[in-house]
Image (spheres, rainbow, N blue to C red):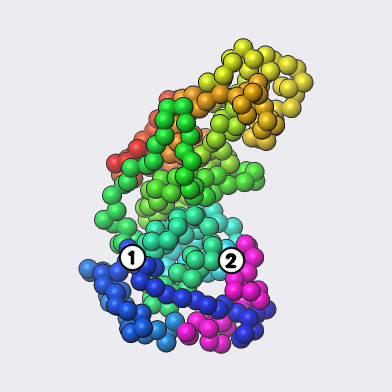
Amino acid sequence: MPNAAGGVTGVRIDAGIFTKLAGSTNDVTGSLTVSRSGNPRINAAPSAIENFRSASTQDRLLALSIGQSKFGNEEQNRRLAQHLLHTIGFDVGGATPTGELCVRSTSAIIMVQWAAGISVTGEADARTLEVLMVYTLLNVNRGHIMEAATPWENQQPERVGNSGFYTGSLTRLPNTRNDRGDGTIQPVVAVAWARMVQSALDDGRASTIDEFGLAGSAAGYRDFHMQVEAWAAQQTGFVTLAAAPVFSNQATADNWINVRENRRTIDGSWRSIPRELTQPGGPLHGTRGTSDHGYATAIDFNFAANPGGGTYTWLRNNAYRYGFRRTGGSENFHWEYMRR
């Protein structure tokens, strides 16, 4: 348990944190004013920032066991983020932090990161925890953050050439189908997704909100190797409708997949093919083909087990407002961000 000297320290505030929320800021050596049209003005003196280092503030964090360092380990940081998100009014699935950043918590974190003008990672990283503590201190709540998102226009996602892949930064999105790890997506797509999830929660979709998560670790961005594994898994019956890459030598690739011993190694887990086989000179080397997962703009939502349920209906009626279109043919769970 942290003591007065070992709790959260070094919490800082600067005008950049409030880039999206601030109507006006002045030098943080004086008082800080954060305002938006229609919102109450929020004022704090710099001395209030130092109060985060006081025993009274640390007492609120002791129960979360955040450790002796500035922040704790990954699970402790996630619990702290959920506690602070709940405090400012986000639905994180209850008042007791679980440490699991599923759809509710991840969408809230992304909204906070975007509103604060910091990197949109989808993670409870140190910078995000600092922002959340400052927001808590200044009584910035979910309403302020979502209002800051209201004038946001769906932005153009980054694109690459027809044979290339997205190579920029990626944002974590939760895989709610299995325990094989989370997926990733372009940050601009993640913000659109988070806005959509928060809207679905407001519309009463809480009971099925995890269907807005990814249907697997490769249900967002896929590099070429992951797409090859999808193709191979399709050939052996583990998945269907995976777009085929364009191989440098199709006959060589076909021959490889038809070797009985190779087929036996494929288990549909996206981990079954050695990476050297897809590198230049390997039998499975090639280019992206037609899959839009390589652009990091496509999402396979986790409602395939309930294809005619409420989540699909909600997306069909509302997803376009957030820039998403269904582009997967018969795959009603496959949607791509294409701006509004």
Task: Give residue 4's quadrant in the image.
Answer: bottom right
**168 over 31 or under it: above or below:** above
Task: Give residue 44's quadrant in the image.
Answer: bottom left
Q: Of tags 2 and 1, which is closer to the observer?
A: 1
Outermost residue to the left: 37
Q: Residues within 10 Å of mark 1 (few under 14, many from 20)?
A: some
At mark 1, the secondary structure is loop
> Is 40 part of what is drawn in magenta?
no
The part of the chain drawn in magenta is: 50-77
Q: Which residue is mark 2?
A: 77
Give whichever of discs 2 and 1 has the lower sequence position. 1
Residue 29 percent across, percent down from the top left: 36, 83
Residue 202 percent across, percent down from the top left: 37, 56
Picture residue at 32% right of the left edge, 83% below the top: 31
Q: Which residue is mark 1?
A: 19
Is 34 displayed left or right of 211 in the figure? left
Relative depth, front residue between 303 and 231: 231
